[in-house]
Image (cartoon, rainbow, N blue to C red):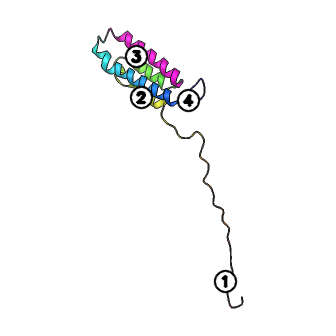
Amino acid sequence: MDAVTGSEPSSGRVRLARAIAISADFLQIVAFPLFLPGAASPWNDALDLAVAAALTLLLGWHWAFLPSFIAEIVPGLDLVPTWTAAAFFVTRRRGPASPSPPPRAIDTEVVRSSPAGPDS
């Protein structure tokens, strides 16, 4: 739920947030280690700040973003797709907010009939 508006993010925002998270993790796992690992660290950190800001703007604040951000600044843990996991965790489908109504009852009426006997 978006902390600013108090509503669920639209499906377009969810898709964009997931695409940003997947792209960021792809860059950090595949592309950045190939090009000067020590010198690319400022770019890696800038990417993490940008992704954290983008996901927060698109989806609203969620606690799942904090461990992801901390894991991304720890050397070696940035090789785990934490942004993708956080984005999918935050945007997962939940059940209905209110409980479902109880099932409808079938009204019945008991009808008694006396057995037909010799007196009737």
Residues in magenta?
A: 38-60
Q: Quadrant of residue 104?
A: bottom right
Tell me the residue at 61%/48% (across/down): 101
Q: How far apart are labels 1 and 3 at the CA level?
A: 86 Å
Q: Quadrant of residue 32?
A: top left
The residue beneath circle 3 is: 73
The residue beneath circle 4 is: 1
Tag 4, which secondary structure? Answer: loop
Q: Earlier in the sequence, mark 1 or mark 4?
A: 4
Q: Is residue 41 magenta?
A: yes
In the image, residue 71 above or below residue 88: above
In the image, residue 106 above or below residue 23: below
Q: Nearer the viewer, mark 2 or mark 3?
A: 2
Q: Nearer the viewer, mark 1 or mark 3?
A: 1
Residue type marked 3: Ile
Horizontal placement of 104 versus 12: left or right? right
Mark carried by residue 30:
none
Q: How far apart are labels 2 and 3 at the CA level?
A: 16 Å
Q: Earlier in the sequence, mark 1 or mark 2?
A: 2
Tell me the residue at 36%/11% (across/down): 41
Residue type marked 4: Met
Q: How far apart are labels 1 and 2 at the CA level?
A: 72 Å
Residue 93 coordinates in the image, percent (x, y): 49, 36
Residue lying farthest left? Answer: 34
Tell me the residue at 34%/11% (across/down): 40
Q: How far apart are labels 3 and 4 at the CA level?
A: 26 Å
Mark carried by residue 85:
2
Asked if disc 1 and disc 4 are in contact, CB closer than 8 Å, the reply is no
Residue lying farthest right? Answer: 120
Residue 56 coordinates in the image, percent (x, y): 51, 21
